[in-house]
Image (cartoon, rainbow, N blue to C red):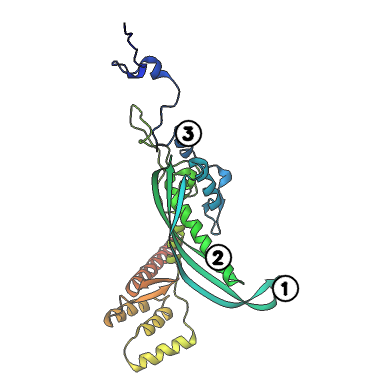
Amino acid sequence: MATATEAPASTTAEGPTQHTQNQDEEPVRRRGELSRAQIGYLLRGIDPMRVGKDGKGFAHVEAWDIRRHLIRVFGFGGHDTDMLEASLISETSAMRQKMGKNGPYGDPYEAWTVIYRVAVRLSVKVDGVELGHWHGIATGDASNQPSRADAHDLALKTADSQALKRAATNLGDQFGLSLYNKGSQEPVVQGSLAYLKPKTEQQFKDDKVEAEPDVAAAQQEAADAVPASPTAEQREDVHRQEQAGGTTLEALKGKINAGWSNRRSCEQNLADARKHGLLDEPVKVDEMDVRVEDLLTRRIAQLKQQAAQANAGEGQAA
């Protein structure tokens, strides 16, 4: 007589038994899924020993450290990087000398400054199945290098490393995401509803969201920048152009520089720009192109505010 074979506890009609529900073993992981260990590690806050400061004082992680953690989390061969773009933006040279405590020394040499832009794609795999891919783009420079080849090499590697780091932040706090939160080393991801299945919705505690440090610094630098004072030669050129009749962009730039601290002059320059159709013309401010109208409008508002503050101060002193 044939004997009945008992079905495994986990496949009985009644569903999982108490034994299978209480066991602490990790459930069977499907191919291509992150393990509990991987998820747990990715949700931790970054180790403070991994965080340093870059040349501008911002918190950052070294590119080689990002690479070793990609290997730690996803294994050897668990990620790919593809360079999508590598463009030379600028290459300049100038004669330089070494500077010591007692001033310049040695023979003059040609120093090279190079800037590259690089875009990369970072792909992550689990069990050979792509988990996802992300893009990063960055510029890198090498300044005053005595070797032209070394300048290109350093600038290209710097841009490549920065682009990789930006792409990797999509993997969370272990890859530097929290550092964009004013350099914080506390985890900002905290958890993910894609992996956590609580009885109630997962609660996250978020800090106030602010601009990324490098973006905020660039915005402040642009706001603080003012046109340089015109040279005697520039003032003479403006005078000649005005005598010849009409207002050219170069003449207007000279007038803007000359009257930068005077609100009436700025207002007159704005009116002249409108009269001669120069409102949309670009003016270089701290390596950025700014419309004439925007530049003068902001400056007039600044001068008005300064005057109001000065009047308020005089009133309080009285």
At horizontal 40% and vertical 88% (from top left) the residue drawn is: 238
SS at mark 1? loop
88 to the left or right of 300: right
Task: Look at label 2 and name its amino acid.
Answer: Asp
For residue 62, say whether it is visible: no
Disc 2: which residue:
153
Label 2, label 3: how many angstroms apart (C-alpha)? 38 Å
122 to the left or right of 108: left
User: Which label's residue is closer to the chain start, 1 or 2?
Assistant: 1
Task: Look at label 1 and name its amino acid.
Answer: Asn
Q: Nearer the viewer, residue 109 or 210?
A: 109
SS at mark 3? helix
Q: Residue 196 location, x and y as percent? A: 38, 32
Sort mark 2 into few (<14), some (14-19) or many (20+) by Cα contacts within 10 Å. some
Disc 1: which residue:
102
Disc 3: which residue:
37
Q: Nearer the viewer, mark 1 or mark 2?
A: 2
Label 1, label 2: how many angstroms apart (C-alpha)? 32 Å
Q: Residue 171 location, x and y as percent? A: 43, 45
Q: Nearer the viewer, mark 1 or mark 3?
A: 3
For residue 58, say whether it is visible: yes
